[in-house]
Amino acid sequence: MAWRPLTSKGRAQILAALAMAWTCAVAGRLVQLQIVEHGKYRRQAESQALRDVELPARRGGIYDRNGRPLALSIPVDSVAVNPRQAPDPSVAAGILAPILGLDPKALEAKLAAAGASRRGFLWVQRRISFEQSERLRKLKLGWIQLLPDSMRVYPKGSLAAHVLGSVDHQERGDFGIEKALEGELAGRPGRAQVMSDVVKRAVESRIQDAPEPGKDLTLTIDERLQYAAEQELAKAVTARGGQSGSVVVLNPENGDVLALASYPPFDPNKAVKSEEELKARMNHAVSAPFEPGSVFKVVTLTAALETTSLRPETVVPCGNGSINLFGRIIRDHKAYSSLSMADVLAKSSNIGTIQIGLKVGARNLLDYVRRFGFGRPTGLPLPAESGGRVWDLPAWGKTSIGSVAMGHEISTTTIQLAQAIAVLANGGRLVRPRLIAMRQRPGEPAVEEPVPAAAQVIRPETAITMRQMMEGVVLHGTGTLARVGGYTSGGKTGSAQIYDSACRCYRHYYNSSFAGFAPVTRPAVVVVVTVNGAPVFGGAIAAPAFRQVTATALRLLSIPKDLPDAPPPREEKPAAYSDLAIADLGPPVPALPEPGGPADPGPVQLLGPAVPDFHGKTVRKVLEESAEMGLPVEVFGSGLARSQNPQPGGILPHGERVRIQFAR
């Protein structure tokens, strides 16, 4: 069939058909893109233009009991770059490094590696200063991104650092309250959608989920008292060559921790850079158990008052300085034939305490150790709190009754000692130490922390009697350096030799402590001072620190004085060898020379003042009158003066003391 050329009508029909086909193809494609696969391409577009951004929550602040800030999070900028948009790495590093104080070569290598891996984002430095932010903004370079961030700051530096703790580079708590209460302080981050242009600049944002800020915490700590405690602790540790230490100041009525200090200090604003700096972050007040030594005798005597017929005036045989306890010879620091129970505590007689412990019995003694809270954590919201160590009866040896009575074969922490002394100070109730006073989320009302219910663990009259005997420790016993000017005070010294596992022997370094309260009639504060690893004893190193911290606490709390002001006691002997120091020491220390022995030349008999009549007067009245006269006295027992030597009107030989016996 011969080919015939197309007519104009035929060509028009073909063109119309092609146009129709093209129109159908385009329409089909549009239907596919806009209807069938609309969701797919919309998601792709959104993924390129929209991105989810986490909105960090403001971390809660931490304040002292008077509202003074101790830890805050402040807004700052962090620097990032887009390596794809940045210029040559050497040029970029040359711009950024001088402003940010970075090593140019290291930053250049970092930028080059990010560019080679085709990364679109690289952190350069987190949390820069305001001045650095301003300098970078003035450059107006699109490849430099200044992103909002926050930085945790501790405006008081090392103050209360062991309580507060610190945070890591992501602002998550890693020590102290910052770690223990991370969930409350951190809050909950939010989420926002950000629309960006082709160069990734934010054009529009929409909050999907608002962040929930962390709670602000108000502590029971008083910043002023905390400062005083830290200063006195540092002075005590460094002046006598100690290694570490701690101080706890407690309100005995409700358990509020008014100060909690630990040594050595650290600055939470600075990152840890060495093993020594890491060790400094240990909170010795709650995490470092130790053998308490003689300070623990208050528990033994309390148990005796409640479970035996012993009373403060009861005469206790002291074996002339030694006792054979089931084949183990234990020696005292000084040879006493006998002492009243009150003087066993005042003079810290080991033999007298063992005799009292034997009267109490192992089962009763362990019961009272538990009643005072030993052997379990106090529950403070601080990480790594130790519960100490208290052995159950099956683990006791034959002589454990003697060791435990003197504060050995048992370990405790400074906060546990404060809790135990508070039992005697508040009338026999075991209060749980409290560190958080209030919680508050921004925009919401503050919620006060409830005071935990206290359990009555000993009789109120027992607590009163123990306070009177502990006052004797300060007035005429091993704790005279703890006497607070203008206030009555009571307490107990303690010194336990530290066992060296390397040589399997006791070194002449001690856990030295003083635990006490003031005023005696109605104690407002309990203060416990512990110094570890010093070559001196509790009465010499911890008692003076107790005196200073207690005086500051009573002044800040506006507690009225209950005594006329008097100068603090003067330390006349080297502290390491004074009677007030040696008396605390347990069995490993050799006894002092016997009175009248080769090392004791005896008193020089010279004429002295006439002795007044003290009969029928209280201990306090006798001490006030004797202080006014400059007359040295030595008191025994409690109650009213019943006898004295020399007799009224007699002449006191020079260098001697008037010995007065008190009884009820």
Image: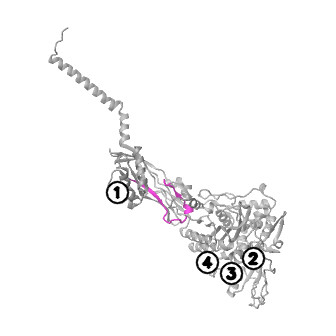
Quarter occupied by the N terminus: top left
SS of the residue at dot 4?
loop
The amino acid pointed to by label 3 is: Glu
Q: Tell me: 160 left or right of 516.
A: left
Q: Check contact, mark 4 vs mark 3: CB within 8 A.
A: no
Q: Contact (CB < 8 A) between labels 1 and 2?
A: no
Front residue of this view, candidates 580 and 597: 597
Judge from the rendering whether residue 352 lies leftward or rightward of residue 47; answer left or right. Answer: right
Q: Position of residue 63 (x, y in %)?
A: 51, 63
Residue 208 seen in the figure: no
Tell which circle, 1 or 4, labels the residue nearer the N-terminal end: 1
| Mark before the other along the chain sequence, 1 or 3 | 1
Seen from this angle, which residue lies furthest left? 8
Q: Gap between marks 1 and 4, in whole Å? A: 61 Å
Q: Which residues are magenta?
A: 146-171
Under circle 3, the secondary element is loop
Q: CA distance from mark 4 to mark 2?
A: 22 Å
Query: Is 141 colored magenta in this rendering?
Result: no
- The image's mark for residue 561 is 4
Q: Earlier in the sequence, mark 4 or mark 2?
A: 4
Disc 2: CA contacts within 10 A as few (<14), some (14-19) or many (>=20): many
In the drawing, what numbered circle is on residue 572? 3
Numbered disc in front, either 1 or 4: 1
Marking on residue 638: 2
- The CA distance from mark 4 to mark 3 is 27 Å
Residue 510 is at least partly visible in this image? yes
- Tell me the element at label 2: loop
